[in-house]
Structure formats: C-alpha cells, structure tokens
C-alpha cells in the first residue's frame, strides 16, 4: 500500500484557537477549539455542530433524556482566525533565533502562538 500513513494527521489548529467554519451547517460561524482529534482528522468547536444524544438514566446522569453536545468537524472545513488581524488566515511556520518554531499568520505576518 503506497501512500499509507499511520492514520494520524497534522493539524493546523490547536486547542483554544479560534476558528472559522468554512463548510457545513454552521458555515461562517466562529468558535473556540475544545479538542483536536488527530486520529480522525477532526476538531470539536465550542457551541458549533451541536448534535442531540438520547441517553438512558445512569449513575452520572440520573434523569436521562436528550443531551446536546458538540459534534466533530473535519479539519479541512475549519480555518484559523488570526488573533491580531481578526481574519481567517492560512498559517505558516517560522523558526526563531532560539531554535523554537512558531505559527505565523500569512495575512499580517504576526506570530499566532502564545509565549
């Protein structure tokens, strides 16, 4: 099988980044990334792509009923929002003099990573 990878994809977004949804039901909305699922190539975005889950009563959830929670969105369908210029932008990598690497906004050239 040529071209077979280990199943883990590289993500252009990280937890706590703000992203813009480019495709799907929530197109045009922005939200904070709650989790990045590298094995499936998806992200969970706060209060976006809400799905209803019907649950039975259990020890943790005595009542049971219908719970709304975030569903995963494909990484290819979200775009990073630059905190400096506040626009959806592609990101690049830049090597610092100290040897560390940071993400850089392709629109304004500012660094995206904190610290």
Image (cartoon, rainbow, N blue to C red):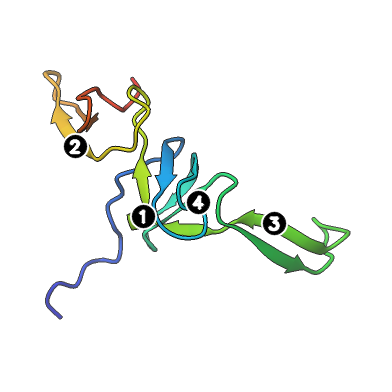
Quote the CA–CA distance across marks 4 and 3.
13 Å
Query: Which comes sooner in the sequence, label 4 or label 1?
Result: 4
Q: Label 2's element? A: strand
The number of numbered discs placed on residues in the rendered structure image is: 4
Q: How far across and how far down the image is residue 28, in percent? A: 45, 47
Q: Of residues 103 and 48, which is closer to you in this image?
A: 48
Q: Name the residue under label 4.
A: 44
- State which quadrant residue 100 falls in: top left
Q: Residue 75 got which mark?
A: 1
Quote the CA–CA distance across marks 2 and 3.
35 Å
Query: Which comes sooner in the sequence, label 2 or label 3?
Result: 3
Quote the CA–CA distance across marks 1 and 3.
22 Å
Query: Which comes sooner in the sequence, label 1 or label 3?
Result: 3
**At 37% from the left edge and 35% from the top edge, which residue is drawn?**
81
- Asked whether the residues under the numbered discs 1 and 3 touch, taking CB atoms below 8 Å apart as contact, a structural biologist would say no
Quote the CA–CA distance across marks 4 and 1.
10 Å
Q: Mark 2 points at which residue?
A: 92
Quadrant for the C terminus in the image: top left
Quadrant for the N terminus in the image: bottom left
Q: Name the residue under label 3.
A: 68
- State which quadrant residue 59 falls in: bottom right
């Amino acid at each position: 099988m040529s071209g077979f990878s280990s199943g883990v994809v590289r993500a252009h977004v990280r937890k706590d980044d703000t992203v813009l949804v480019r495709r799907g039901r929530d197109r045009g909305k922005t939200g904070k990334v709650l989790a990045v699922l590298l094995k499936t190539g998806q992200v969970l975005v706060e209060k976006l792509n809400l799905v209803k889950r019907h649950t039975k009563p259990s020890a943790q959830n005595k009542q049971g009923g219908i719970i709304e929670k975030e569903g995963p969105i494909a990484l290819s369908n979200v775009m990073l929002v630059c905190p400096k210029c506040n626009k959806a932008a592609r990101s690049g990598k830049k090597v610092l003099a100290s040897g560390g690497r940071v993400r850089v906004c392709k629109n304004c050239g500012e660094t995206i990573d904190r610290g």
